[in-house]
Each structure stands twice: as structure tokens, then as C-alpha cells.
């Protein structure tokens, strides 16, 4: 049984412009020469550089809309959840509709640097990925963070 490298789709390169890479999904299949393929299809992975701002007046972003990242630190959902906790805490402490823009500014100020660090760290981790399983970046600062406590400290 021969394992094959996933083939690029038309128009794709293995490293896309926005710090991206290639992911593949595994399953059984057969190539033209009758060999079993372990990987069935491939798709591009994309992120973005950190945005300079998320909020405008009474609107803001969270999750992937604010900080799309590569999966190499496994943080896409976690960062979205941290955003949600921080946003709910800061909006909950706002006593009137007039306070919403201030709460959103505090939310953005709290979250933007941290999520940018995770976005760029995910890129770095992906760029250096190899089969040794070594960790390129220390992750303790990711796991030791308490989004609720950080937001409460701003209220
Ligand atoms: C294959 C894959 C594997 C992943 N694995 C992991 C993992 O193991 N761990 C991890 O932490 N993260 C993982 N992620 C990343 C994670 O899924 C995302 O970071 C996370 O889902 C972002 O949540 P979100 O709510 O910001 O966006 P989304 O989950 O994309 O939610 C946005 C929602 O808005 C809806 N929507 C869009 N436009 C409109 C509109 N105009 N009107 C109404 N609704 C709209 C969409 O349908 C969607 O339901 C993975 C992602 C992919 C693609």
C-alpha cells in the first residue's frame, strides 16, 4: 500500500500568500495506477494579518471575523470563546446604551494584542512544522490566561 502526497488543486500552491498552507483529509481511494491513497483531497488554509481595528461605534467583531488564524496552535475556537467571555463581561457592566461604544473599545483593547499574538504564533508554528512533534513556541501563556478575570479587571 503506497501512501501518496496530497496533490495540489488547480491554482493552488503549497504556501498561499496569506501565511497559509495546505491541509488534507484522509480516507481510502485509488489512484490511476491502482495504488491506495491515504489522503483523499486537499484544500488551502488561509489566515490574515492582524487587523488594526475591530470596532466602529456600536459594531464589533469576534472570532474568525476578527482574527482568522491557521490551525497550528488549535486556537480558533478557544480565542472566539475568550472573545465572547470578555465581550459579555464588558457589555454586562455597561449601565446604558450610551456606554456600549466604550465597552466595545475596552473589549477590543483587551483582545486585539492577545489574538494577534496567537495568529502570528500559529503561522510560526505551521511554518516550522516537521515530523518530530517538537513545539516551536511555548504555549503556557495561551493556557494560563483567564479571559473573564482580565475583563472584570476593566469594569
Ligand atoms: C476543518 C477545520 C477544523 C478546525 N479545527 C479546529 C480545532 O480543532 N480547534 C479549534 O480551536 N478550532 C478549529 N477550527 C477553527 C474553528 O472552527 C473556528 O476558529 C471557529 O469556528 C470560529 O468561530 P466563529 O464563531 O468566529 O465563526 P464560524 O464558526 O465560522 O461561525 C460563523 C457563523 O456565521 C454564519 N454566517 C455567515 N454569514 C452570515 C450571514 N450573512 N448571516 C447569518 N449568518 C452568517 C455562518 O454560517 C456560521 O455559522 C477548525 C476549522 C476548520 C475549517
Image (cartoon, grey):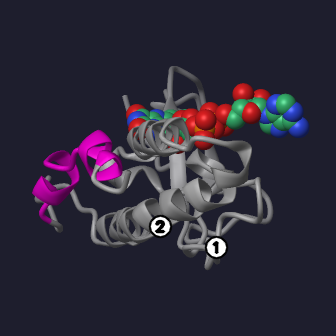
| Secondary element at image label 2 | helix
Q: Residue 45 lies in what quarter of the image?
A: bottom right
Give the residue displayed 72% in from the left and 44% down from the top.
97
User: Which mark sits nearer the N-terminus, 1 or 2?
Assistant: 1
Give the residue displayed 37% in from the left and 46% down from the top.
75
Ligand 1's quadrant = top right
| Region of the chain picked out in magenta, as a range | 138-152
Give the image location of residue 73, x and y in percent: 31, 52
When the figure is inspected, residue 34 is found, relative to residue 12, above or below; the finding is above
Which of these two is toward me, 2 or 123?
123
Q: Is residue 135 left or right of residue 24?
A: left
Give the residue displayed 16% in from the left and 59% down from the top.
141
> Mark 1: few, some, or many residues within 10 Å (few <14, many ≥20)?
few
What residue is shown with label 1?
53
When the figure is inspected, residue 116 is found, relative to residue 58, above or below; the finding is below
Q: Is residue 132 visible?
A: no
Q: Is residue 149 visible?
A: yes
Give the residue displayed 65% in from the left and 65% down from the top.
54
Q: What is the spatial separation of the Cα atoms under label 1 and label 2, in whole angstroms?
A: 8 Å
Which of these two is toward me, 60 or 101?
101
When the figure is inspected, residue 4 is found, relative to residue 134, above or below; the finding is above
In reply to whether residue 146 is colored magenta, the answer given is yes
Q: Quarter holding the N terminus? A: top left
Which of these two is toward me, 134 or 124?
124
Give the image location of residue 103, x and y in percent: 56, 54
Residue sitting at the far top: 28
Rendered image: mark on residue 112: 2
| Secondary element at image label 1 | loop
Which of these two is toward me, 68 or 30?
68
Instruction: State whether the magenta stretch is mostly helix, strand or loop.
Output: helix
Give the image location of residue 59, x and y in percent: 76, 54
Amino acid at each position: 500500500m503506497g501512501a501518496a502526497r496530497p496533490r495540489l488543486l488547480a491554482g493552488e500552491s503549497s504556501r498561499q500568500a496569506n501565511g497559509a498552507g495546505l491541509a488534507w483529509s484522509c480516507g481510502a481511494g485509488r489512484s490511476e495506477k491502482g495504488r491506495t491513497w491515504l489522503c483523499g483531497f486537499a484544500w488551502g488554509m488561509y489566515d490574515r494579518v492582524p487587523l488594526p481595528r475591530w470596532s466602529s461605534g456600536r459594531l464589533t467583531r469576534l472570532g474568525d471575523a476578527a482574527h482568522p488564524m491557521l490551525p497550528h496552535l488549535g486556537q480558533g475556537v478557544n480565542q472566539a470563546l475568550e472573545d465572547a467571555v470578555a465581550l459579555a463581561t464588558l457589555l454586562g457592566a455597561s449601565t446604558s446604551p450610551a456606554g456600549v461604544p466604550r465597552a466595545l473599545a475596552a473589549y477590543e483593547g483587551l483582545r486585539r494584542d492577545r489574538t494577534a499574538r496567537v495568529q502570528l504564533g500559529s503561522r510560526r508554528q505551521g511554518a516550522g512544522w516537521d515530523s518530530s512533534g517538537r513545539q516551536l513556541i511555548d504555549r503556557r501563556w495561551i493556557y494560563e490566561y483567564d479571559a473573564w478575570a482580565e475583563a472584570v479587571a476593566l469594569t
